[in-house]
Amino acid sequence: MQKVYYLSSCDTCKRVMDEIKIPSSFIKQDIKVQGITEEELDELFNLTDSYEELFSRRAKLYQERNLKEENLLEEDYKGLILEHYTFLKRPVIVNNDEIFIGSSPKTVAAAKKSIHNN
């Protein structure tokens, strides 16, 4: 599978996708328009073994609900991501059996190398 989960209104997602030069062969899923399904989330989990790794602590709702004070478990992270798209750390880039989560320079460089050096 070659897929990108992103938010079209997110400048960081756009910058990362432009920088990596995501090939047209990749499926691009705007998570605000077409939310992530439990099946899709489970596929991402199978590549990471962690819903927490897919979870964004930068989400406004994370602050508003004071979730930092909660002792969240893996199932909690999964439920929150399925409940609201902003809880998914983005972009999430899947290149076959590799997954790249977020926008750190190290992650972007690794994704770029994986996609363009095969």
Image (cartoon, rainbow, N blue to C red):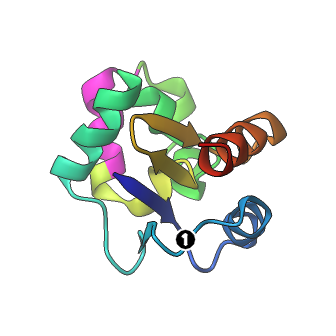
Number of numbered discs on residues: 1
Residue 90 screen position, x and y as percent: 57, 53
For the C terminus, the quadrant is top right
The quarter holding residue 117 reads top right
Left or right: where 45 falls relative to 39: right
Q: Amino acid at mark 1?
A: Leu
Rendered residue at 41%/55% (across/down): 2
Instruction: Reply above or below: 11 against 78.
Output: below
Residue 46 screen position, x and y as percent: 28, 29
Instruction: Reply above or below: 4 against 47.
Output: below
Query: Most prominent secondary structure in the magenta stretch?
Result: helix
Most extreme residue toward the front is 118
Q: Is residue 27 magenta?
A: no
Rendered residue at 62%/40% (across/down): 114
Q: Is residue 75 magenta?
A: yes
Residue 58 screen position, x and y as percent: 65, 47
Instruction: Reply above or below: 100 against 72.
Output: below
Most extreme residue toward the left is 39
Rendered residue at 42%/59% (across/down): 3
Rendered residue at 29%/38% (across/down): 78
Depth order, front residue of 88/116: 116
Left or right: where 99 falls relative to 14: left
Q: Residues within 10 Å of mark 1 (few under 14, many from 20)?
A: many
Depth order, front residue of 3/24: 24
Residue 77 screen position, x and y as percent: 36, 34
Left or right: where 14 falls relative to 50: right
Magenta-colored span? 72-81
Q: Which residue in the protein does label 1 denote?
A: 7
Q: Secondary structure at mark 1?
A: loop
